[in-house]
Amino acid sequence: MDRQKRICGRKGIESSQLLITDRGLPFYRRTESGKNVTQIFINKWGALMKRVRKDHPDFPRYSFTSLRDTAADRIRHIAGGEVAAVFLMHGKPVKKDDLLDLYTNRPFGEVFRALRQLGRDLQPVFDAAPSDPGKFTCSSTRRWASGSRSSNSTARA
């Protein structure tokens, strides 16, 4: 945890903004061999899909990449196509101008603003999430929908 705090302090960001494992390692990192990235996100996504389908067997089997596609769609709705293209980092954000990247910076600030807005838009979802996703049940959903949220079952901001 000290390492995370040092990194966050050096970068000027809050430590709560980084996703880390129980051992304090970043979710997204190279494996020990350095050839691959860890599968933590994909494994967590698979576990989430399995858990949702336990209560809702007809729920579609969305791949992990569908999450990225949906995020890009939401970013485009919030800030426009150029910002969504930078968010996805698919080549040139403006295809008509080959020299644009040579003379200007990509609007990463706009991407960060759009991501903050997306976070605000999704805050009710985060607030309703249990602190232990393994204990999530349909009755939890009914409690949250009725406004009866116990402090031990909701995520803390």
Image: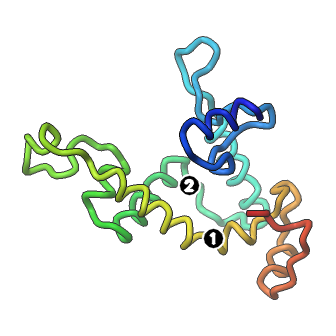
Using residue 153 as the reference point, say whether residue 103 is left or right of it: left
Residue 11 placement (x, y as % from top left): 54, 39
- Residue drawn at (62%, 34%) of the image: 7
> Label 1 sits on what residue type?
Gln
Specify which label sits upstream in the sequence, 2 or 1.
Answer: 2
Element type at marker 2? loop
Using residue 117 as the reference point, say whether residue 93 is left or right of it: left
Task: Answer whether labels 2 and 1 touch (C-beta < 8 Å).
Answer: no
Judging depth in this view, the residue of 112 and 62 nearest the camera is 112
**Residue 115 tag number:** none
Q: Where 5 falls versus 60 (above or below)?
A: above
- Residue drawn at (29%, 52%) of the image: 107
Q: Circle 1 sits on which residue? A: 123
Q: In which quarter of the image is residue 98?
A: top left
Q: How busy is the neighbourhood of tag 2: few (under 14 within 10 Å), some, or many (20 plus)?
A: few
Residue 112 placement (x, y as % from top left): 43, 56
> For the residues marked 2 and 1, what is the alpha-carbon distance in whole angstroms?
22 Å
**Residue farthest to the top?**
33
* Quadrant in which the N terminus appears: top right
Using residue 87 as the reference point, say whether residue 40 is left or right of it: right
Q: Quadrant of residue 12?
A: top right
Q: How busy is the neighbourhood of tag 1: few (under 14 within 10 Å), some, or many (20 plus)?
A: few
Residue 128 placement (x, y as % from top left): 75, 71
**Residue 62 tag number:** 2
Residue 117 placement (x, y as % from top left): 48, 68
